[in-house]
Amino acid sequence: MSLCPPYAPFFGFAGVASSMIFSTVGAAFGTSKAGIGIAGLGTFKPELIMKSLIPVVMSGIIAVYGLVVSVLIAGGLKPTDYSLYTGFIHLGAGLACGFTGLAAGYAIGYVGDSCVRAYVYESRVFVSMVLILIFGEVLGLYGLIVALIMNSRASGSQQCTF
């Protein structure tokens, strides 16, 4: 059996798609959930809106992680000389980045919404909100790092035999 079946690039493209789709869905959820909280805050204290945009910015960074991984994986895709091993590594890298981006987006969304609403009544919650948001963002960063390590393993993978 050949190490480079014609369907091997499918798994690489699935990695590209899952990295981009899942991390973007997480970022969109985080942005929308935190945006709802900011809209609620803006009706009571409009002067706090600019400081409360931190969860929205952090959610957008999650989508950038998925974009970076998908571009790197897409750069390693080749129509020929692409092994099944490389395809599975690219799929795993895309799933790692995508699912951690999804989890980070949900975490940032819920924390951002709750903390921004609490910020209306108590200004001391701001520092704890930023710290919790950083820990949520780190989930996506871990996925990015794992995906980059996996992608580096794919570059030196086995050659195809025909």
Image (cartoon, rainbow, N blue to C red):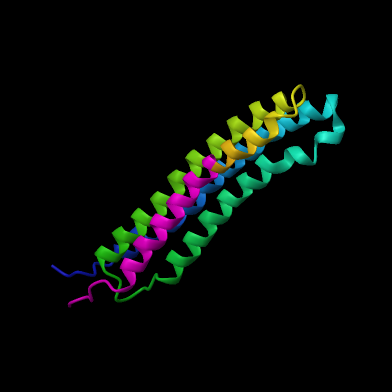
Residue that sits furthest to the left in the current view? 1
Q: Position of residue 124 (x, y in %)?
A: 71, 29
Give yes or no for residue 140 being in the magenta stretch.
Answer: yes
Residue drawn where x is 58% and y is 44% of the image: 27
Give yes or no for residue 2 being in the magenta stretch.
Answer: no
Residue drawn where x is 22% and y is 73% of the image: 158
Residue 19 seen anywhere in this rendered image of the structure: yes
Could you tell me which quadrant the C terminus lies in?
bottom left
Is 88 situated above or below 134?
A: below
Is 80 situated above or below 52?
A: below
Could you tell me which quadrant the N terminus lies in?
bottom left
The magenta region covers: 135-162
Viewer-side residue, 71 vs 13: 71
Chief SS of the magenta region? helix
Residue 10 seen anywhere in this rendered image of the structure: no
Is 128 situated above or below 74?
A: above
Residue that sits furthest to the top in the current view? 121
Residue drawn where x is 41% and y is 62% of the image: 148
Q: Quadrant of residue 75?
A: bottom left
Task: Report whether 8 appears left or right of 62.
Answer: left
- How many numbered marks does the figure carry? 0
Q: Position of residue 3 (x, y in %)?
A: 19, 69
Residue drawn where x is 34% and y is 61% of the image: 150
Q: Quadrant of residue 106?
A: top right
Q: Position of residue 119 (x, y in %)?
A: 73, 27
Q: Quadrant of residue 42?
A: top right
